[in-house]
Image: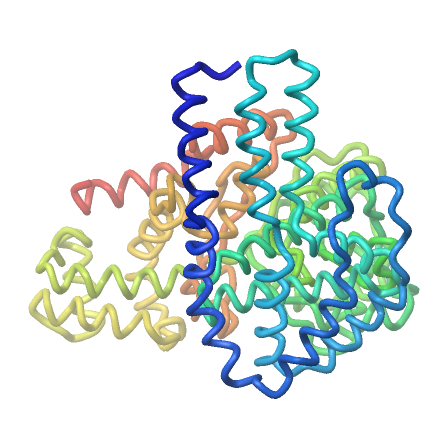
Amino acid sequence: MISHPIIWAVRSIVRSLRHRSVYKGALKASNISGWRWFSTPIRVGVTEMEEILARVVAPLPAYETREKSPPVPDSNSLELMRFYRSLDKENKVGFLTKLSQDFGVDHKSVSELAVKLLDNQLRDLATVLQVEDRLRYSLTPRYKQLLNHISRVESGVKFLVDLRSDVLEIISAKAIESPNIRELNSMLKSLLSEWFSVGLLQLERITWQSPCEILQKISQYEAVHPIRNWTDLKRRVGPYRRCYAFTHAAMPGEPLVVLHVALTEEISDNIQSIVREFATLESEEDVNKINAAVFYSISSTQAGLQGVELGNYLIKRVVRELQSEFPHMTQFSSLSPIPGFSSWLQGLLSQYRKEGRGSDLLSEQEWKAVEQATKSSPETLALDALRKLTSTSEWMHSERLSHVLEPVLMRLCAWYLYGEKRRGYALNPVANFHLQNGATMWRLNWHADTSPRGVANSCGIMVNYRYFLNDTSNNSARYLQNKVISASEQVLGLVSQFQKNSKL
């Protein structure tokens, strides 16, 4: 039960809001900028939009009849889907704004039930629970019913996944500042998380015998190491390789998240040996040469499922699948790119130059080596030369420059992965993903990705996140709860070197 002073205080506030209409006015004020943003460019289509929404978004049934209301015709959902798909990008913003703004929660009803709940706090528990249930029901947005109905028609779930993708794009682009749009996004994410829970997903192994449409989508969706042609694709689903995908019955033929695995003797330290080696294209697998599984690419294919946990469950399911196929296998690791390292490095070098702290970044001996290799002096010019040098791939073609930069870039990269944080968690999104799964930051690999993309993103460095199966649960809990990163001696040694040179 809530104490008397708190009850009286909250009751007073809620009644004041209700009787003075402050609450309603505040809601209108919060959305006025958003309304102006979309109403001007789509003035012609507003009436039609209002008519369709009024027709297809059913009122929230009364609490007493919530389980007895007649089903909404499928034609309503299909009509709305057709209408929305016909809109251009600008009109979609207007549609989603109006849907979230005018067909959300009945705030007046909520405030009245909140007062009633407070008034009944001193009554018996059954009464309190019933009022709480009414309040909970009143917090349901009207559009939630529409979303549920759409999910039941053919292609409805795919439509809602794409709809959330549009909502996320609006939020990311800051096309409109509206708390209602963010609430719509939260509702969609909540519903999609239920519909795409791991128990409802099917694990499929993709092979060269899989339907052509699936193989084509696997090729198109590959976001980490682009597939160049059909021969390349055949290699990636052939001997010593595995490709797995999660699918869902409501989206047939659509892989949701795809994982590529290399079966190797040892944990790989170079991606080119995996994606460009074609010697075993037609060979038979020798189980004696398979001791490790290397996850070298994982791609989420549906932007609308952002934030819905799929990738971590896919890795765990694949580990079980591989253990069943290769009982002797004990080594599981990723070979991961490090997106963002190069841009972070450029910012760090600029910052150190501005602050005149170049001597803190490299040792005296290393600065001399950089000066000699780049023919620059004194320190400030050497720092500029280093910044310019690492912004291109030219140094990769010089054995001397590569030798000079290796210790510097390796420890800077180790610090970027281990020491740079956002809200206490790893700044790098790939690191954060694997650490949440319970992996150990195990090994940094020099010249691991010499492709133009690899050099541009991470100076050619890649990292292995190793899954020690007996430790993953504990590692995950320590990271998520206490923000502790599990790392190997190699990584910690490089971090220590960075801290020593940078006086951290």
Residue drawn at x 38%, y 46% as measured from the top left: 422
Residue drawn at x 52%, y 85% as measured from the top left: 41
- Seen in the picture, residue 192 relative to 375 is either above or below; the reply is above
> Which residue occupies the foreground of this view, 51 or 200?
51
Image position of 365 (left or right of 484): left
Q: Residue furthest front?
A: 19
Q: Position of residue 107 (x, y in %)?
A: 56, 47
Q: Position of residue 47 (x, y in %)?
A: 66, 80
Residue drawn at x 58%, y 29% as measured from the top left: 116
> Which residue occupies the foreground of this view, 423 or 386?
423
Colour scheme employed for the rendering of this structure: rainbow
Identify the image quadrant of the C terminus: top left
Q: Position of residue 455 (x, y in %)?
A: 44, 69
Image position of 382 (left or right of 289): left
| Residue 479 in sight here | yes
Q: Residue furthest bottom?
A: 44
Residue drawn at x 66%, y 65% as measured from the top left: 275
Q: Position of residue 64 (x, y in %)?
A: 80, 36
> Which residue occupies the foreground of this view, 306 or 207?
306
Image quarter for residue 258? bottom right
- Seen in the picture, residue 350 relative to 16 is either above or below; the reply is below
| Residue 241 in sight here | no
Image position of 278 (left or right of 225): right
